[in-house]
Image: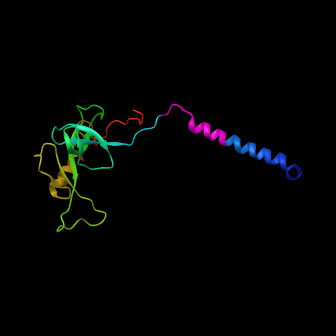
Amino acid sequence: MRRWLNQNPVAASVLILGFIIFWVVVLVVRMNSDDGERALAPVEFYFYDIETGELFAGPSNVSGPIDAPSGEGNGYKAYVFTCGDCNDETQRKVYWIEKPMSFEEDEEPPDEGEVYFWVRTPDMPKDDWVRSDSPRGEAIFRLAEAPCPEKKQRLNHCFPPRRYLDD
């Protein structure tokens, strides 16, 4: 083989170039083909409209407040669970709502790596937020750790249904 390549450099170059062109064409066709798969949008979180009590989908990378159907800054990240099917809105329940904690200049922020939020349940008064690391905050979190009464299983954490980017 080596001898043939040495004796026929033009033919060898044509073969190698043809091989490269073939694979480039295969890759381009493969990348541009519509094979029926659609790209999924990023996972979203439920948000709670503090004015109406309604849930709506929002970006997972923010805690809130975000704009809600009822107005600017009325949406807070909601933690929604169910013992049944997350797609059945009659079975879903908001266990707590969170908003980021801000610190005044005279307050000491948490140690690095520690994150605290203000939390409350939907049935608490609108302005009654508690620290996530307080006994009341920890009691709120424990509500979602209780097993489902009928099935003796843990609650399912619900997220809005996934959608496609082209929807």
Query: Does the magenta run of residues contain 34?
Result: yes
The foreground one among 110 and 61 is 61
Q: Position of residue 1 (x, y in %)?
A: 85, 50
- State the image quarter where residue 47 is shown: top left
The foreground one among 32 and 98 is 32
Q: Is residue 26 above or below residue 4?
A: above
Q: Is residue 55 visible?
A: yes
Q: Position of residue 158 (x, y in %)?
A: 30, 40
Q: Quadrant of the C terminus?
A: top left
- State the image quarter where residue 71 is shown: top left
Quick check: 33 left or right of 77?
Answer: right
Q: Residue at x 79, y 44 (%)?
A: 15
The foreground one among 163 and 73 is 73
The foreground one among 87 and 103 is 103
Quick check: 31 left or right of 113?
Answer: right
Q: Position of residue 62 (x, y in %)?
A: 30, 50
- State the image quarter where residue 28 is shown: top right
Q: Is residue 34 above or below residue 12?
A: above
Q: Residue at x 68, y 42 (%)?
A: 23
Please provide the residue range marked out in magenta. Answer: 24-37
Magenta residues, dominant SS class: helix
Q: Residue at x 30, y 66 (%)?
A: 112
Query: Does the magenta run of residues contain 144?
Result: no
